[in-house]
Image (cartoon, rainbow, N blue to C red):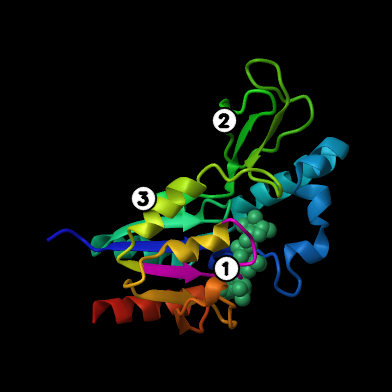
Amino acid sequence: MSKRKLVVLTGAGMSAESGISTFRDSGGLWEQYKIEEVATPEGFAANPELVLEFYNKRREQLDSVEPNLGHKGLAELENNFDVHIITQNIDNLHERAGSTNILHLHGELTKVRSTKHPELVYEIGTKPIKIGDKCEKGAQLRPHIVWFGEQVPAMEQAAEIVSQADIFVVIGSSLNVYPAASLVAYAPQTSPKYIIDPKDVDIPFGLSFYAIQKTAEEGVSKLIQLLKK
Ligand code: APR
């Protein structure tokens, strides 16, 4: 019998217990930085050094954080389910936990790309990039990350995956940012839907999800118990 398709949409809360701050919690990243200055094309044009430094710091942090039990639990679920991770996160913790089927909606911290030839993407691990670092065709490099106001190229693929879900789970996202948040509308009506979050999250379009009001670590372990039944 083929494994049931378990589709998981993760957000910043997935990595909170690994020590990576979320965006909209108290003390979150958007309380320390202005989105328009560090996460928009206009911000990059106005002050590229500030933007490169913002991502250099977050990239460097990857060397000092580890996947948490939530990331690991999702990786283990691959033994019993056809697991598809769709993440809004730009960290590499799902990969490092052992998940093998990951779609990054908002890009990846460990990758950079050419500002003139977007098809030229380079893996740089946790190294910094600065003004003057160029692609093979001589154009400045930038983070391979989707900034506010930019297209989300993986959206169509993500919607297709969610539309095939036998079980759909949201973990650690306030579902505030579109188009990512609209993915909840693609899950088949008949498929069970769960949301893992310590807070009460407003689900778009009034859809009903079974709320596991716990952190990612405790919530994934609870989810695993529920799925075993
Ligand atoms: N475990 C699970 N969830 C948690 C935890 C935790 N330990 N701590 C906080 N959360 C929840 C919060 O309650 C909140 O609902 O994680 C969610 C984080 O929401 P946001 O900070 O808005 O993060 P996210 O939804 O991923 O933001 C989406 O916005 O800034 C952009 O591109 C960025 O991908 C990001 C997007």
Query: Which portion, as a residue range, is magenta?
Result: 168-179
- Mark 1 lies on a secondary structure that is loop
Q: How crowded is mark 3: few (under 14 residues within 10 Å), some or many (20 or more)?
A: some
Residue 122 is situated, as x and y percent measured from the top left of the image, at 57, 30
What kind of secondary structure does the magenta stretch mostly adopt? Answer: loop
How far apart, in angstroms, are the residues tagged by discs 3 and 2? Answer: 20 Å
Residue 199 is situated, as x and y percent measured from the top left of the image, at 60, 82
Residue located beneath label 1 in the image: 173
Q: Are marks 3 and 2 in contact (CB under 8 Å)?
A: no
Above or below, comparing residue 207 to residue 136 in the picture: below
Question: Is 65 positioned to the left or the right of 207 in the image?
Answer: right
Counting residues from the start of the chain, the first of labels 3 and 2 encountered is 3
Residue located beneath label 3 in the image: 100
Residue located beneath label 2 in the image: 122
Q: What residue type is labelled 3?
A: Thr
Q: Tag count in the figure?
A: 3
Q: What residue type is labelled 2?
A: Tyr
Q: In which quarter of the image is the N terminus?
A: bottom left
Q: Residue at x 33, y 75 (%)?
A: 224
Above or below, comparing residue 41 to residue 165 in the picture: above
Verify whether residue 174 appears in magenta: yes
Q: Residue at x 42, y 76 (%)?
A: 194
Counting residues from the start of the chain, the first of labels 3 and 1 encountered is 3
Ligand 1 near label 1 (Cβ, under 8 Å)? yes
